[in-house]
Amino acid sequence: MSKSSRRQSKRPPAGPPPNKTPSYRLRDEQSRVDLTFRTGQYGVGCFMAFFLAGWSVGCGFLLWRVSEDPQREHLLFAVPFLVGWLFAFLVLMQSWLGRERFVLDSDGAQFWNRLIFRYGRTAMPLDELVTFGTAQQSDDTKDYSGSRVLELRTLGKPIRFGSACTDEERSSLMWLLRSRLSELQNLNDKPPRLSQDVKSLVFGRRLGGELLADKDALRTADEAAIPPPADTRWRSSSDFDAVTFTHRGRWTTGGVIGLLMLNAFWCGITGFFVYQLFWGDPKERPHGLDWLWQFLFLIPFELVGLAMLLGLLFTMLEPVRCYRWRFTRDEATCKLSWFGLGPRWRYPLEMPDRLEVRRVPYTEVKFPKRLPLGSLWSPKGCPTFTLAFLDATRRDLCHVEGLTLGEACHWADLLLRNQPHWFG
């Protein structure tokens, strides 16, 4: 028996086991696969319903107290608990009604979440899809008993879904989606534009008699240009002496609302006790050692609240954030700024001879050494890619870390074509 036939025999049948209700809805047509999953767990939803019932009784008592005695202190104390009730209600609705949908057809892959309306939509063309697999959501990469999800690996960011599936359902869906993806790419003649099998991709000029290491590939300016991946937020521009890549922040309504609720709950309760400590009723305000003890006790809660407020501020200022790499003849400049103000890093480039796209393995920490903002998008257990600049002696001059495969290759290809003086 050949290896391929043995692999085929291990594949589970597509679809759920007999006499078992699946945790997903599948529509498998000739050229389209439509999957719908629930995102929450009913056990969590039942717990939240029980928790919310008790919370509702407490909030009702607070509202009654405010209506009977509408003092400023009572109102300030009630607001954080009402905000917490709203947050718990949204978690309950997400646990019971939250859905995610994945569609694979001749145009590519589409994925979005749904509660009351669509949000978080992602679309990738067919020639940027690599393969389907499973990914781990736990922090420990060696703990395979943690929660796992289906993962669509692309030239850009991976798409993950199906967290509520069982292991058997996940395995059968993985093989079904792999076969459908292969069929669609063969039928439409759209294989993946780049291969993830190589250890590194080298960009530069071809030297006579040069031997590359195993699993390496060389690309020159004579080959077809590499476009950016569809999901990238990096924008490139070039002039007569420089190439610039810019990544601008964007407004996230869900993130701002979530942080507002969290700040209203935590800072509201902490602020009430601080108010009582300094400006409360003199008859009820503590004095002496009791006042000092409460003052010291509140300091860590105030520091946590300050960190939450800073997180909210940076999230609201995200639309004016700009992360920029600029490459000139003799240096690379990296700048992170808000309203044009921020730190800048300079790296000399002494006539780089090669550009190399390196794959960072799953098991390595993916935060860049100098600036960790570049790979904050990276989910747990997901590889990222590094663009390295090498001189003629193969010594590293500079690194750009935290990119996807499509982004790193697009950067290298664009620099190869727009900075020819580096390569000869």
Image (cartoon, grey):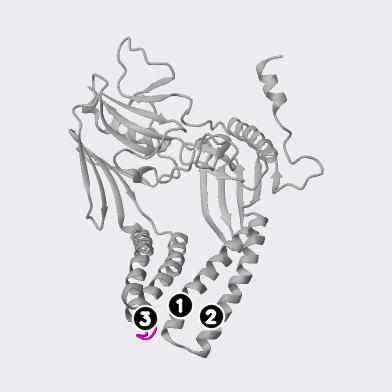
Task: Quote the CA–CA distance across marks 2 and 1.
Answer: 8 Å
Q: Quadrant of the C terminus?
A: top left
Residue occupying the point 32% across, 17% down = 206
Q: Position of residue 18 (x, y in %)?
A: 80, 40
Left or right of residue 367: residue 61: right
Mark nearer the N terminus (2 vs 1): 2
Q: Residues within 10 Å of mark 1 (few under 14, many from 20)?
A: some
What kind of element bears circle 3?
loop
Q: Amino acid at mark 1?
A: Phe
What kind of element bears circle 2?
helix
Question: Mark 1 and mark 2 in contact (Cβ < 8 Å)?
Answer: yes
Question: Mark 1 and mark 3 in contact (Cβ < 8 Å)?
Answer: no
* Along the line of sight, the residue nearer the viewer: 100 or 163: 163
Residue topped by disc 2: 62
Q: Which labelled disc corresponds to residue 417?
A: none
Q: Nearer the viewer, mark 3 or mark 1?
A: 3
**Residue placed furthest toward the right:** 19
Mark nearer the N terminus (3 vs 1): 1
Q: Which labelled disc corresponds to residue 285?
A: 3
Magenta stretch, overall SS: loop
Q: Amino acid at mark 3?
A: Arg
Q: Amino acid at mark 2?
A: Leu
Where is 241 relative to 304, above or below? above
What residue range appears in magenta? 281-285
Q: Position of residue 248 (x, y in %)?
A: 34, 52
Q: Which labelled disc corresponds to residue 77?
A: 1
